[in-house]
Image (cartoon, rainbow, N blue to C red):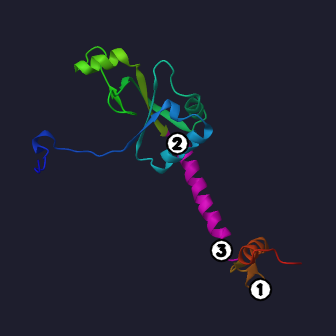
Amino acid sequence: MDKELKFPEELSTNVERSFFYTIENNDIKSDNDLSFLIRIMFEFSDRKFYLFCLKSQGASSYVINAEQHGVINIKRTELQYYPHPKFDHDYIKINKTNPAWGWEEEVIKDSPEFIRCTLELTERWKRKLELKEALDNTTDSEANGSPIILKPSIFGIGIDLPKALKWFIQKYGKSPDY
């Protein structure tokens, strides 16, 4: 059994690699869960995000609320998904009218149907997060900088007093005595 298995080249001429996240409806139970999802969607915007929820229940109120407020788009909704019989957090699309395998018939009979919703951040919300990140980076670099301002002023050098006070407290651990 030391032989290396090789994939027959004749079967495929094109291989495409992609990443996706499987999110179950009960994964989003709070505002913090939704905020975490939004942050992940922003950080990994090139990936797909699929929300699976029971057909009888639909998406959670947090997701619906985020869509109504223009944060998330439910880009596409697909029916006929069922939980994989052998793997947790995995769903398979099965044609109810014409299952391909015998085990698919058992899954249809024994498991509830799920819908798969493709989630995306809205363009407006992406821009908002990009702007917030850029402003945070600018504010951080200014806050950690020197209190001395090398911009044109009356004497050629200025001091930013609030920043100088913060710098003094950071450096010496106490505020100066006045």
| Residue 145, numbered label | 3
145 vs 26, nearest the viewer: 26
Up-down: is 77 above or below 11?
above
Q: Position of residue 174 (x, y in %)?
A: 79, 74
Q: Residues within 10 Å of mark 3 (few under 14, many from 20)?
A: few
CB within 8 Å, label 1 to label 3: no
- Quickly name the residue at label 1: 155
User: Which amino acid does the dot numbered 2 rest on?
Assistant: Leu
Query: Which mark is nearer the camera, 3 or 2?
Result: 2
Which residue occupies 28% across, 20% down? 104
Which residue occupies 60% across, 42% down? 32
- Quickly name the residue at label 2: 37
Label 2: which secondary element: helix
84 vs 97, nearest the viewer: 84
148 vs 155, nearest the viewer: 148
Query: Which mark is nearer the camera, 1 or 3?
Result: 3
Label 3: which secondary element: loop
| Residue 9, numbered label | none
Quarter holding the C terminus?
bottom right
Q: In terms of image quadrants, where is residue 89?
A: top left
Q: Which residues are magenta?
A: 121-147
**Most extreme residue toward the right, as rendered?**
178
Mark 1–mark 3 distance (CA, rounded to whole Å) = 21 Å
CB within 8 Å, label 2 to label 1: no
Q: Position of residue 165 (x, y in %)?
A: 78, 74
Mark 2–mark 1 distance (CA, rounded to whole Å) = 51 Å
155 vs 79, nearest the viewer: 79
